[in-house]
Image (cartoon, rainbow, N blue to C red):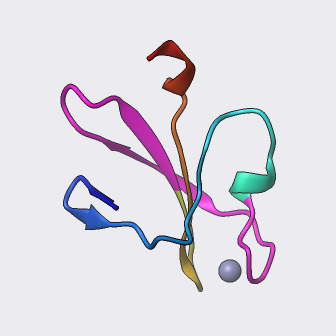
Amino acid sequence: MEFDGMEIPDDIEVTVWGSNEHRLCNVCRAECDPEPSGADGYGVRIIYVCRDHGLQSVVDPFEHLR
Ligand SMILES: [Zn+2]
């Protein structure tokens, strides 16, 4: 899976708003920093990146609109 020229590992789940679980690092359970990641015509994604463990989750706030 790939978008924005960034490769997303297959074990990363794309989630939607609703819980806070996606904010937490799967490894150290620290709260990750949200970073916007969007592409024209493809909607906006928010990625959560742990400073120590890298990309943790990808959130699509507008999935329900498509
Ligand atoms: Zn971590």
| Residue located at (50% from left, 23% from top) | 62
Q: Is residue 6 left or right of residue 13?
A: left
Q: Position of residue 24 (x, y in %)?
A: 75, 63
Judge whether residue 44 is colored magenta: yes
| Residue located at (79% from left, 54% from top) | 21
Q: Position of residue 23 (x, y in %)?
A: 71, 55
Judge whether residue 38 is colored magenta: yes
Give the image quarter of residue 25: bottom right
Q: Height in image: 65 above or below 18?
A: above
Q: Height in image: 28 above or below 56?
A: below
Relative depth, front residue between 12 and 52: 12
Q: Is residue 57 left or right of residue 47?
A: right
| Residue located at (56% from left, 19% from top) | 64
* Quarter of the image that includes the C terminus: top left
**Quadrant of the picture in which ligand 1 is shown:** bottom right
- The magenta stretch is 24-47
Q: Position of residue 58 (x, y in %)?
A: 52, 52
Relative depth, front residue between 45 and 36: 45
| Residue located at (51% from left, 26% from top) | 63
Give the image quarter of residue 17: top right
* Quarter of the image that includes the N terminus: bottom left
Give the image quarter of residue 50: bottom right
Count of marks placed on residues: 0
